Image (spheres, grey):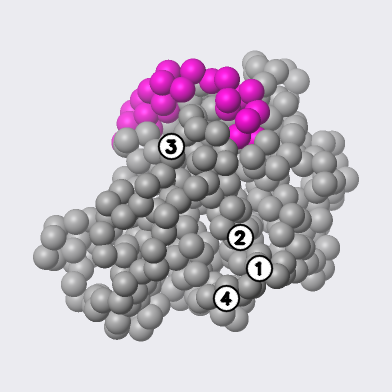
């Protein structure tokens, strides 16, 4: 059960720029390769279950020697051959990003990841708890807090894209929040390396499959059977998922019912009315344009992530006020 381990905490190993810097500054980082150490599953005590999906289950654990709490993700299948190696490479590349959930160790036998524990869960859970505590059903996140959450989500995608990675399952469930007011991107089961291959030093653009993921968040081109995309197309698919995510956080509900059939989803997404902030909703022009910029049906017309980071909805927000507002909303649901 040997593993690759990040031997120090991320803030001790890396220097990075937080939100407020220009997009090209935010994507600069120093990331040495992980050192090799031995870690066993017996080094951890089970605390509780956090969740499960089609390819992994996640539990909350405590490291016996240090007392530190982590999320332990245990693989139980692969979406495609080599998925575990691809995910490990994504985590290695993303080491040190303040907008990507940190990986502290990768176990090979059994396949598992020792991940940073985010105590507020995913953004979908934040919405559910917010409603359960007396908020009006369907009430979403107010714009000041939403702008901060969207900025963190976009910064996480910017970091991945700058490293040659497409996430390909962008949705509220895959953004995790903490009581510190952080939002970080997670869950790389369907992610793809866009240049070379896992562990490759090549910069040759790859055409990658884009048909795996959650269909409620698919862009129109992903419904084509066997669809492939180069780097720009795969990144554009992530932007669509971000647009749907921001729209759902604003509305406080699913845009499309998870119970819809694949055929119904394809009809609505590819041929229905364009996805936008509803006309009757009380929303700023900046939010409406941000969502519309993400949800263009033609991939080439969608905004790129650096453009979104410079969009007025994010760039002109009152950063301190937005951070406070997001943290209050997260903490009040715990």
Q: How far apart are labels 1 and 4 at the CA level? A: 8 Å
The earlier-in-sequence mark between 3 and 4 is 3
According to the image, label 4 marks what residue?
200
**Residue hosting label 2:** 164
* Distance between the alpha carbons at the discs numbered 4 and 2: 11 Å
- Mark-to-mark CA distance, 2 and 1: 9 Å
In the rendered image, residue 328 lying in the magenta stretch gets the answer yes
Any mark on residue 203, and which? Answer: 1
**Callouts 2 and 1 close, C-beta under 8 Å:** yes
- Residue plotted at (61% across, 53% down): 161
Q: Which residues are magenta?
A: 308-334
Q: Residue at x 18, y 72 (%)?
A: 43
Q: Is residue 119 magenta?
A: no
**Local crowd size for mark 2, using a 10 Å CA cut-off: few (<14), some (14–19), many (≥20):** some
User: Which mark sits nearer the N-terminus, 2 or 1?
Assistant: 2
Which element carries disc 2, helix, strand or loop? loop
**Residue 165 falls in image quadrant:** bottom right
Q: Residues within 10 Å of mark 3 (few under 14, many from 20)?
A: some
* Mark-to-mark CA distance, 3 and 4: 29 Å
Residue 18 shows which numbered tag?
3
Q: Residue at x 41, y 21 (%)?
A: 320
């Amino acid at each position: 059960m040997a593993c690759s381990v990040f031997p120090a905490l991320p803030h001790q190993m890396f220097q990075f720029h937080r939100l407020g810097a220009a997009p090209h500054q935010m994507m600069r980082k120093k990331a040495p390769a992980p050192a090799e150490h031995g870690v066993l599953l017996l080094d951890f005590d089970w605390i509780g279950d956090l969740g499960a999906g089609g390819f992994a289950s996640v539990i909350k654990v405590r490291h016996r020697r240090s007392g530190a709490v982590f999320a332990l993700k245990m693989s139980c299948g692969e979406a495609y051959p080599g998925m575990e190696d691809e995910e490990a490479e994504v985590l290695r590349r993303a080491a040190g990003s303040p907008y990507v959930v940190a990986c502290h160790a990768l176990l090979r036998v059994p396949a598992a990841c020792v991940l940073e524990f985010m105590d507020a869960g995913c953004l979908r859970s934040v919405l559910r708890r917010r409603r359960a505590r007396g908020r009006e059903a369907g009430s979403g996140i107010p714009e000041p807090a939403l702008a901060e959450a969207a900025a963190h989500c976009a910064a996480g995608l910017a970091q991945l894209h700058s490293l040659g990675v497409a996430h390909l399952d962008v949705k509220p469930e895959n953004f995790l929040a903490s009581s510190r007011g952080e939002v970080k991107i997670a869950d790389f089961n369907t992610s793809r390396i866009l240049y070379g291959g896992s562990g490759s030093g090549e910069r040759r653009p790859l055409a990658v499959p884009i048909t795996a993921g959650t269909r409620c968040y698919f862009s129109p081109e992903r419904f084509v059977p066997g669809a492939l995309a180069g780097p720009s197309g795969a990144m554009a698919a992530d932007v669509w998922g971000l647009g749907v995510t921001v729209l759902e956080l604003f509305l406080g509900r699913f845009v499309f019912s998870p119970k819809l059939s694949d055929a119904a989803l394809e009809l609505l997404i590819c041929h229905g009315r364009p996805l936008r902030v509803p006309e009757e909703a009380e929303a700023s022009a900046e939010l409406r344009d941000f969502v519309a910029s993400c949800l263009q049906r033609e991939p080439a017309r969608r905004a790129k992530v650096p453009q979104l980071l410079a969009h007025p909805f994010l760039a002109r927000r009152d950063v301190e006020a937005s951070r406070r507002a997001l943290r209050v909303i997260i903490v009040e649901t715990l």
